[in-house]
Image (spheres, rainbow, N blue to C red):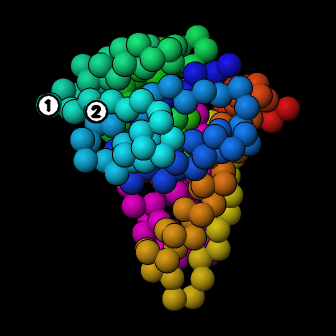
Amino acid sequence: MINLGILISGRGSNMAAILAAIKFGRIKNVKPCIIISNEPEAAGLKIASEKYSVPTKVIPADGFKGWDYDQKVVAALQEYGVTPQSGLVCLAGFMRIISPEFVRQYKMRILNIHPALLPSFPGLHAQKQALDHGAKITGCTVHFVDEGVDSGPVILQKAVPVVNGDDEGTLSTRILEQEHQLYPEAVRLFGEGRIKVQGRRVSIT
Ligand code: GRF
């Protein structure tokens, strides 16, 4: 069994998609142990506790940066059984950059979802970046987190066409629908031990 911790900052719709997939048996071998938010008002906290009965914890930044903040997160993860040896950490709209110390402790055990086809359009406002660039195809990516921003090895991607008349809202909505399929799928594959990494290349066995 893999103990899962999910880090959020807001809406939590990707978190909810993962929790639903676990609850309804589409993901096996993965147990949701703790949802952590840096934002006390994150809507996802209520969804996690009320709809999915998963423990939640708010860890406000309070001016703490980098590892000074992340070590509080790591302590909470460990307290709930999400260990660097056998745990899994999913970033799901967590609006903080993870410190190198955190990444090194949970080596290849931290996943993130990004609303673009990486390495295109990393960072904030990826959907707007794609529109502004005039891209015809964008999408979403689940990747391992490394020490850079949205730069770790790619696990799964799904393409989403940009259509005439799209604005940031319409495009984001269509990408989000695909995110809700892709992220649970990646967690399922991780839980089944089917993700193999060699350098930057990830294969699904
Ligand atoms: C998603 O678009 C995700 O790709 C990005 O942040 C957003 C989080 O949305 N990393 P939600 O909180 O999961 O609804």
Q: Identify residue type, mark 2.
A: Val
Left or right: residue 174 versus residue 75 is right
State the residue lying farthest toward the right. Answer: 205
State whether residue 102 is above or below residue 91.
above
- Near mark 2 (Cα within 10 A), the count class, few <14, some 14-19 or many ≥20, is some
Question: Which image quadrant is residue 197 in?
Answer: top right
Q: Is residue 118 magenta?
A: yes
3D distance between C-alphas at marks 2 and 1? 15 Å
Q: Is residue 37 magenta?
A: no
**Foreground label between 2 and 1:** 2
**Residue in front for this viewpoint, 37 or 101:** 37
Q: Which residue is mark 1?
A: 63
Q: Residue at x 68, y 63 (%)?
A: 159
Quarter of the image for the N terminus: give it: top right
State whether residue 2 is above or below residue 154.
above
- Near mark 1 (Cα within 10 A), the count class, few <14, some 14-19 or many ≥20, is few
**Residue in front for this viewpoint, 25 or 132:** 25
Q: Residue at x 58, y 22 (%)?
A: 3
Q: What span is colored magenta in the figure? A: 115-144
Q: Identify residue type, mark 1.
A: Gly
Question: Which image quadrant is residue 195 in?
Answer: top right
Label drawn at residue 152: none
- Residue 117 can be seen in this image: no
Q: Residue at x 69, y 44 (%)?
A: 24
Residue 173 at x, y percent in the picture: 51, 70
Looking at the rendered structure, the secondary structure element under dot 2 is strand
State whether residue 46 is above or below residue 189.
below
State whether residue 128 is above or below residue 125.
below
